[in-house]
Image (cartoon, rainbow, N blue to C red):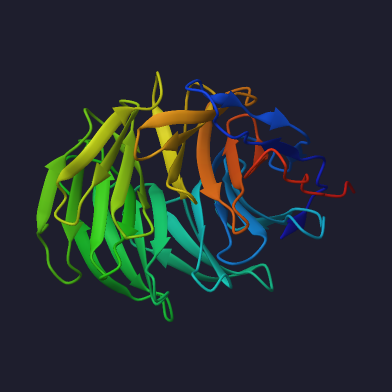
Amino acid sequence: MTTIPLAACLIFALSDDRTNSPSSAILEKKLEGHRDGVFSVKAQPGGDLLCSAGRDRTVGLCSLSNGSPMHRLVGHDNQVLRAAFHPKGDLIASGGADNVAILWNVRTKKSERVLKGHSNWVCDVAFNEAGDRLVTAGADGTARIWQVSDGRQISVFKVPGGEVWAAAFLKNGDVVTGGKDGVLRRWKVGQTEPTASTKGHANDLYSIALSKDGHPATIGADGKVVLWDDQLKIRDSWKAHSGQAYALAFLAGGRLATCGEDKTVRIWDVSSRREVSRGADHKNAVYGVTALADGRLASAGQDRVIRIWSKSIEDPPVRVSVR
């Protein structure tokens, strides 16, 4: 584990949408920590921590409330592509281009278990709602289910269509996967064939998020957001970004955040498909977005900077001390 200084924090306020044009975010502060691009950022459930996956081969861990320095969790031998918190917030799972997933103890900041099985990059990691299982998505064309307590591999899904970029557990324990062919597939643990599959994107499907009611939403290289029902039928879709889009996250109030290679973070009203706010301060592609416990939003990308966006223009800035 390496500790590096927390240089600054970019904080934005998302103004209320009073017109049909998207409002601009207000830049307040700036946060840096990683030494290269950041592929994902996730918030601790019910807490104030952020974890991030870096091209610099580390997992970043920092607090928004106490201003402590960012910790870089060292253990991967290649770039880290995804990191995510356990539902209890006491563990982090990360996946990397070294073909392994690692489970980290948040309190000790040390690795507890290395999960080996993929023969190519581990592109996504996600815990189930109970926290006893982890799914990993691989560029080897498989998704794998692991027992968190002992690291045992439970199931392997051989996904047709090439690399698997994204995977997530549904509320009932089923798994959905997406990848190179733009198809969303649903799987039952222990079975070898998908129970449903629908093509929703022209090509690469990069990210999956679940709404409060448990329905999946996806985003991909075609720049589209796709909303799905329980049977993997398309409920709605729209063009969210002019180029490739990389991640999405549901927010409070029926809104959705997206990000992409056009250097923007965009906030959408889901019911009307209307863009209500946009942040364009990133200097390069934006790869990750996440909703914070207090209603704020964090984003991160190729420019190495994690930005925090306020839930409304009246919110006070998040204070992060510089060391």
The front one of 168 and 142 is: 168
The front one of 236 and 298 is: 236
The front one of 131 and 4 is: 131
Residue at 20 percent of width and 42 percent of height: 235
Residue at 45 percent of width and 60 percent of height: 101
Percent x, y of residue 248: 43, 42
Q: Quadrant of residue 191?
A: bottom left
Please state if 175 lies on the left or on the right of 212 as rendered: left
Residue ranking furthest to the front: 18
Please state if 132 lies on the left or on the right of 203 as rendered: right
Q: Is residue 79 visible?
A: no
Percent x, y of residue 8: 80, 40
The front one of 11 and 245 is: 11
Location of the N terminus (image quadrant): bottom right
Q: Quadrant of residue 54?
A: top right
Up the image or down, 112 lies above or below 4; here it is: below
Up the image or down, 118 lies above or below 8; here it is: below
